Image (spheres, grey):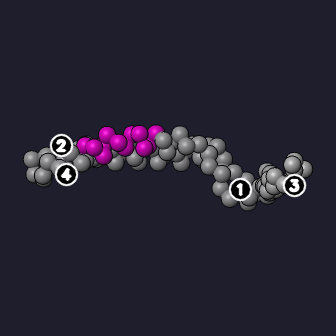
Amino acid sequence: MHRITSAPEPLADDLARRQRRYLWQMGIRLVCFLAAGLLWPYVPMVVSLGLVAAAAVLPYVAVLLANAGRERRGDTDVFFEAREIGSAPRHDELGGGR
């Protein structure tokens, strides 16, 4: 039996949260591109290249996080019990003496 406090987040809420996170990350990517283009003549080239590199990597990270799926929060159900495997019998206990 599940308690209401342990019910998973509704699918629509989960999808909306992942879409918002993706849009924020794509907004940050846009800011990186704009900053790299506008600051190119005023800052060292390393800074502009770093912004372009960040803008190039952000889509991959954003897609991975957006497709991560529904995470289980506080799931404490035990689906199996771990059992200890006993030690192997010693050779002299096997009855294979000479």
**Circle 1 crowding by C-alpha within 10 Å: few under 14, some 14–19, many from 20:** few
Distance from Cα at disc 3 to Cα at disc 1: 44 Å
Sooner in the amino-acid sequence: mark 3 or mark 4: 4
Image point (73%, 53%), residue name:
7
Residue 16's x, y, as percent? 55, 45
Q: Is residue 56 rendered to the left or right of residue 81?
A: left
Q: Are marks 2 and 3 in contact (CB under 8 Å)?
A: no
Distance from Cα at disc 1 to Cα at disc 2: 47 Å
Residue 44's x, y, as percent? 12, 52
Secondary structure beneath dot 3 equals helix
Residue 92's x, y, as percent? 84, 54
Residue on which the image places disc 2: 37
Image point (87%, 50%), residue name:
97
Sooner in the amino-acid sequence: mark 4 or mark 1: 4
Which amino acid, mark 4? Val
Q: Nearer the viewer, mark 2 or mark 4?
A: 4
Q: For residue 4, which quarter of the picture?
A: bottom right
Residue on which the image places disc 4: 47
Q: Are marks 3 and 1 in contact (CB under 8 Å)?
A: no
Q: Are marks 3 and 4 in contact (CB under 8 Å)?
A: no
Distance from Cα at disc 4 to Cα at disc 1: 44 Å
Sooner in the amino-acid sequence: mark 2 or mark 4: 2
**Circle 3 crowding by C-alpha within 10 Å: few under 14, some 14–19, many from 20:** few
Residue on which the image places disc 3: 93
Q: Quadrant of the N terminus?
A: bottom right
What label sits on residue 75 in the rendered view? 1
